Image (cartoon, grey):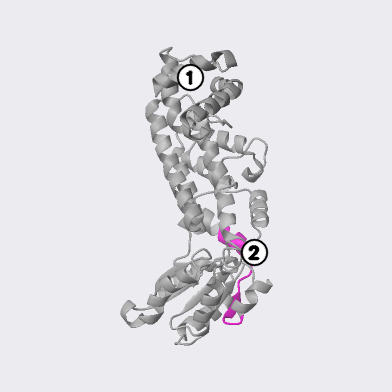
Amino acid sequence: MWSEKHRPQLISDMVGNEDARKSFVEWLTKWKKGTKPILLVGPPGIGKTTLAHIAAKEFGYDLVGLNASDVRNKANIKEILTPLLGNTSLLGKVLIFVDEVDGIHGRADFGGVEALIDILKEPTVPIILAANNDQSDKMKSIKKTAKTIHLKPLPPRLLGLYLHKVLKDEGGKLSPGSMIKIIMDSRGDIRSLLNMAQAHVTGFEPATEKSFETLDVEAAVNAFFKAKSREEAQVVLYSLRIDPREKINAFYSSIVTSNITAEEMARMLDIMSKADILYGRIMRTQEWRLLRYIDNILINLYAENAPIQYSQYNLSWPLLNRIRWDGKKIRDMSSVLAKRFHVSQSTIATFFFPYVLLCMKNKRLDLGLNPEYDELLQKEMDLIR
């Protein structure tokens, strides 16, 4: 993506917020033990994270990055930060960067804020905090311990100049009207600006002339597999802003019900499993910053002219109808078997059903559940036991 390819490599390469960047550099160059941490405040995509990483590289620091999920727990803070703060001479030059600090507060806060504030009051290494908003009452305690620098959205003039440069480097062209629309829609967000520009330059325009964000899941999945190139499919995927679990499920159900070869099915399911494993890790550890990598995994599902269309269900309609109409008999049978074997119905469904189905296939089990068949059913169950 252009937003990654054209990420600045030096602080001087960044666009806009000159005064804010000057204050930041002065703070870092004059830093000494006990200097207040810096709090960078600004909307998403403005360059807070980029500034922290570039500064660490330029000034020779080893950056240790954390986010809200890492510092909600007091024990986590002690485990991660105490070694860094107490052995700075052994570890070299360390710079701590805590992103999304305004997201620490909430039900999942287990003493993390108090522990973090204790560290901010007497820092032994440079500490950079980043937040999208500092106006909430919950941020007051953190703001008291840090120097705040506000980064503002870039004005349209600067966005236009920067977009011209990127288009020149990429050899791409946009009409004046398209450029104006992209600049205004980005609202000062450079990352959004580049993503939208790349979408237009690749030549993909939905037939409805609507942005991908307005497409429903069905239209987006179909557009992904009908894309003429990987880059086009990537734009569709990155623009589909829905819950990651729903996105994974939508692609899974569409793939398993499609008419593709066994080899291609195995390849795609392997990709889906990697995305699912990553999502499970995110849910367990609350490492929300890893969500960005799910799309990087799912893009590998793209295959030119793949005969795949969106499907809401991951079972075929004949099987779904069979389950629907036979559901009552299945539940009744599970109830009878559960009583006979003195186990729960879920245990019957999980462990016993395969053997019951085998008996059905070999015609050794009458599945009549009416009272007149109860005696026969009990005899057959005795045989199975």
Amino acid type of the residue that numbered disc 1 sits on in the rendered structure:
Gln
Camera-nearest label, 2 or 1? 1
Residue at far left of view: 90
Residue at 56 percent across and 54 percent down: it is: 194
Q: Is residue 242 above or below residue 93?
A: above
Residue at 59 percent across and 38 percent down: it is: 220
Please state the extent of the stretch shown in magenta in the rendering. Answer: 144-163
Which badge, 2 or 1, comes first in the chain's sequence? 2
- Residue 369, located in which quarter of the rendered image? top right
Please say whether residue 149 is one of the residues in the magenta stretch.
yes
Dot 2: within a 10 Å radius of its alpha carbon, few (fewer than 14), some, or many (20 or more) residues? few
Q: Quadrant of the C terminus?
A: top left
**Left or right of residue 143: residue 86:** left
Which residue is denoted by mark 1 in the rendering? 378
User: Mark 2: which secondary structure?
Assistant: helix
Residues under labels 2 and 1: Cα distance? 82 Å
- Residue 155, located in which quarter of the rendered image? bottom right
Which residue is denoted by mark 2 in the rendering? 157
Please state the horizontal and vertical placement of residue 322, each as a whole percent of the image: 56, 20
**Left or right of residue 139: residue 271:** left
Amino acid type of the residue that numbered disc 2 sits on in the rendered structure:
Arg
Compare residues 175 and 36 and report the one nearer the observer: 36
Residue at 40 percent across and 21 percent down: it is: 384
- Residue 10 in view (yes/no): no
- Residue 158 in view (yes/no): yes
